[in-house]
Image (cartoon, grey):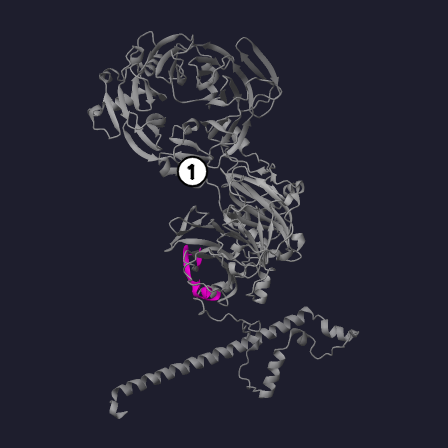
Amino acid sequence: MSDLFLQNQGFLVSITSENEIQVWDLEQRQLASTLKWESNLTALSVIGGSSYMYVGDEYGMVCVLKYDSEEGKLIQLPYYVPSDSIAEASGMSSPYNHSVVGLLPQPASQGKRILIAYDDGLITIWDVSEDKVILIKGNKDLQLKSKTLTDFQKGMGQELCDDVSEDEHMEKEISSLCWVSTDGTVLAVGYIDGDIMLWNLSTMASNNKTEKSSTDVVKLQLSSVDRRLPVIVLHWSADSSHNNSCGRIFVYGGDAIGSEEVLTILSIDWSSGIENLKCIGRIDLTLNGSFADLALLQNDGISKTRGAFILTNPGQLHFYDDACFASLMSQQQKQNSVSSLEYPAVIPVLEPCMTVGKLGFICRDEKFSKAFSKEAQTPRSTKWPLTGGIPSQPLNVENYQVERLYIAGYQDGSVRIWDATHPTFSLLYILGTGVKGINIAGANASVSALEFCPFTLSLAIGNELGMISLYKLMGSTDETHLYIVKETEREVHTLNKGDRPHCTAVFSFLNSPISTLQFANYGTRLAVGYHCGKVAMLDISALSVLFLTDSVSNSRSPVKSLAVTSMSDTISSKSNPEHIESKSNADYVKWELFATTKDAHFAIIDGNTGSLVCSQSLQPEKELSIISTHTLDGGNLISRASSKNDPLNSNQKNETKSEPDQGVTRSGSTPLEVDSETSPRTAYSRQRVENILLLLCCEDALHLYSMKSLKEGDINPIRKMNLLKPCCWTATFKKDDKECGLIVLYHTGVVEIRSLSDLEVVGESSLMSILKWNYKTNMEKTMCSSDTAQIILVNGCEFASVSLLPCENIFRIPESLPILHDKVLAAAAEATVSLSPSQKKTQVSPSGILGGFIKGLQAGKGEQNVDLPEVCNNNLAHLEIIFSSPPFLKPSLDITDNQKVLELNIDDIHIDEPLVVLPSSEMSKKDTKDKGTERDRLFEGTTSDSKPRLRTAEEIKAKYRKEDASAAAARARDKLAERGEKLERLSLQTEELESGAQDFASMAHELAKQMEKRKWWNI
C-alpha cells in the first residue's frame, strides 16, 4: 500500500507494518493522529478533495475514516460496507474468507460509489447512498477474447481470438488495478499470473447483466510464456483528443520471469468497442535503477506538459514527456533506452560517485561571507516541468551571510561546493576537471583529499595521480595567471578575469595518490602527505615547492595525518584575514611538521628545511592499523586530568580498559619561563608547542602521547584505552574554543562521545537509532565533522547531517527547514480546479505518494494574473450525512429543488390587517400555478405563437423612466417612516404578550399553591 496525500490539505496518510494508520502534518512536520487497527489492513484509498478515506482488511471489511483537521483526530465513522450484502450478491460461501486488495472511488460519482476488489478476483461496485451493490463480477463471468502482445512489433498477435483456456474459471488473484477512463466505465485489473483484464463496466451496470459476454472483458498478455511476473503497477494516461477511448497503460510486471526489468507502455484504442481493442504501440522502457514508483502528469488545463515521472532506486527521479514516448513508439523496437530529464540531486552521491567530503566554516562578519551570500542568492534556471512551492523560509537578503560550506570531491575529478548554512543545501559552484583551454594530464583523476582555508577562501584538491590543484573561490576582476609546477619545469598561463572560482596553481611533481592535505600559517603554507609515505611543503605565496622528503616510514606506509606548528600559529586563536599579509612576511623562528603514517610511525620534520628531526615507531612490538591522529593543546587537558583523584585507577566500563603509564607525572604542563633574551611572546609560543599532545586512534585502542616525551625518545603513552570492538573513524570537537571531546564510530554503527581528559565514555548512540542506518564498508571515507560535533555522513544514495550535542543547533531547526506544505499554492490549485469543468468530472485521488505530491504542484503552471476567488471545496457535503450513520439506517437525502430557505422581510409583515382565507379551489389553483415551470411563469399570459411588437414611446417611458433624486429621497423617507411604525406596533404587541404571559404565569402559580393545600379526596 502506498502512502496517500489528503489532496492540497497538507496531510499524509500511511499504514505501518503494525497496522497503525498514521496521519502526518506536513506543515508542522509531526505525527498528527494515529489509529490502531485490530486486523491486518490490506487496502487504503482517499476520496479526492475530501478528508474521507476507505480502508479494507484481511476479512473483507471496508470501513470509512475521516481526519478532522480542526481537532487533529482520525475518526472511524459509523458507516461501513456490509460484507454479508456483498457475499449474498456474489454467492460467496463466507464473506470473511477473502481479503480486500483494492479500493477505488468511482470517478464522476461524487464519492458515492466505491469499487472493491477481493483477492479471489471478485470485483464489485457499492453505492453508499443507496446501500446496495451496483455491479458484481468475478472469474466465473469470464468469456474472454484475448490479445497477446509479445510479438507486436513483428506484426503478430493483433487479432482477438475467442478461445477460452481451461484455467479461466479458476480463481485469479488480483495484484493491481486502475481506472482506464475518466468516467469510471473501463477498469484495468492486473493479476498475480501476469494477465491484464480490461473490464467494460458501463454495459454491465446499465443492463445489470449476470450472463457471460465476450464484449465485457478483454485479456492482455505481455508475454506468451506460461510463467510470468505479477502485474505490480497499473497506471492510465488518457488521450484527450480521442474522446476517452484512447491512451496509454503503464505496466510494471507481467513479463516473463527472468526477463530484464522494464516499464511497459501500451498505446491502446477501443473507440470501436472494448471487444475491438487495438494495440497501437508498445514500449519496453529500460529503467535507470530498480522501479520504485510512478506518477503521471496529465494535460488537465493546469499543466501544459504531459508525461510520466518515474522514481527508481536509489532515489532517482526521471521525467519522460509525450514527445519522448511518441518518438519511441515510432521506432517500433521492443527494448528502448532513451535519455530522460533527471531531477538534479541536491547532493549527488552515486552519479558521480562521491569519494571525499569536507565541511568548511567562514568568518561570519568578513567580506568573504558577504561575497558568498550574493552567489547563494543568485537564481538558478531549471528545465524541470513542475513549479510551485517555496523551498524554505524567506531569507533576509541584506543581512544573510554564508557561514558554512560543504565541499565534496568525486571519482570523475570534479568538485562541488554548497552553502551549508541551512539544512537545505544550496549549490554554489561546480569545479570541473582541469582548466578550459589548457591540457593538464591527470586532471580527471579521482579526488582523494580536500583542504579549505577560511582566511583566504582557498581550496586545495588532491587526486589519485598526485596532482594538487589550488583554487581561489572568490574571483578577481583583474587578469589572473595559472602556474603549473612540475618536477622539472614551471608553466605560466594567462586566464580571463571573472567573478567565479578559478584555478591559480597546479602542482604535479610526484606520481603517488594524495592522502592528506593541511593548510598552515593562515593559508600561506600547504603540507602534503602522499600514499607512498613522503611529505611535501608548498609555499602558496610564491607558488613553489619548499621541500619533498623521503618516506617517513621504512615500510612506505601512507601518511595518515599532518599537523604544522609555528610561532605564528600559537600566538592567538583569533583570526583576522586583514593581517594575513603582515603575518606571512614575518621572520618566524621555527617551523615543525608532525607526520603519522598508517602503520603508527611518527616523524617530526623541520618545516623550513625538510630535514628529519625525529622518527620512530610508536608500537614496534606489534602491527597497528591507525584510524586517525589528532594533535591537542595539552595545557588544559593534563591539568584537568591531574586534578582528579587517581583517575587512572578508576573503574572502567566493560568495553574499555585504561592502562596508566608512569610518564604522566613528568608530562604535565610546562611552566612559562622567560629570560632576558626571550620575549614573552616567543616564550609563550614555545610553551604551547611543548605542551602539545598526540592522540593516536587505532582500531582496538586509543593512545595519548606527550609531544615533549616523543622528542626525547620516550614512546610510552601517558594514557591508553583498549577498545573491545573495532572502531573505524574518530574526530575531536571543541567547547569554548578548547578541545574537550572525542567522537568514535565503530563498525557496529555505535557512536561514542569520550572525554579527552581521561578518554572515558560520556555519551553513546548509534546510526540505527539516529538515522535507521547500518554501517557500510568505506562509509568513513566520505565522513567529515566540525568543531561543534556536527557530522556529515553518506550512505548509499542518502546524505545526512547529525549534531551530537543537544545544545548545538547551528542549523536553526525547525525555523530554517523547507516548507513541505504551501497553503497559498494549495489554495491556488483548489481554485483553479474548481474553475475547470474537466476537473469536476473526477473525484479519484492520485495513487501513490509521488502522484499526490505532483497533483499539488501542478497549479504552479496556471495563469499568474488571474484573480482567484475564494477556494471552493468540492461538493461532497452529502458524504457527511451518508457516513454519519451505519448502512440502511441513514436519514433521507431527498432534497428537492423547490425547498427554499424562508427569508423574512419586514415589508411582508402585515399587522392589524384582516385575515384573508382563500377557498380551497383558489388554494389549489395557486399551488398549481407555483408548481409551473420557470418557462411557463415567464410566458404566463401569452400564447405560443405570440410575436414581439413595437412599443410606443409612452409605454417605454412608463416602464423605464427614472425618477429624480428628490422624488427618490422622499419615497425612501416614506418607506422608512412606514417601517418605523410597523416596528413600533410590533414592539407594543410584544410588550402586551409578555405582560399577558406574566399574568398567566402568576395565575398558574397561585392555582398551584391552592391545589397543594387541598387533599386528594377533595379534588
Picture coordinates of residue 993, whole percent (x, y)? 44, 81
- 112 over 852 or under it: above or below: below
Asked whether 898 or 514 is in front, the reply is 514
Q: In the rendered image, which residue does mark 1 sit on?
A: 812
In this rendering, position of residue 939 left or right of residue 311: right
Identify the residue at image location x=50%, y=22%: 459
* Quadrant placement of the C terminus: bottom left
Task: Please state the total of marks drawn on the protein image.
Answer: 1
In this rendering, position of residue 330 left or right of residue 435: right
Residue 387 falls inside the magenta stretch: no
Asked whether 200 or 724 is in front, the reply is 200
In this rendering, position of residue 62 left or right of residue 163: left
- 637 over 294 or under it: above or below: above
Disc 1 residue type?
Arg
Q: Secondary structure at mark 1?
A: loop
- 574 over 169 or under it: above or below: above
Report the magenta residues as a range: 63-89
Picture coordinates of residue 172, whole percent (x, y)? 49, 54
Identify the residue at image location x=54%, y=74%: 904
Would you identify the image quadrant in which residue 305 lies?
top right
Picture coordinates of residue 989, whole percent (x, y)? 47, 81
Picture coordinates of residue 857, whole percent (x, y)? 55, 47
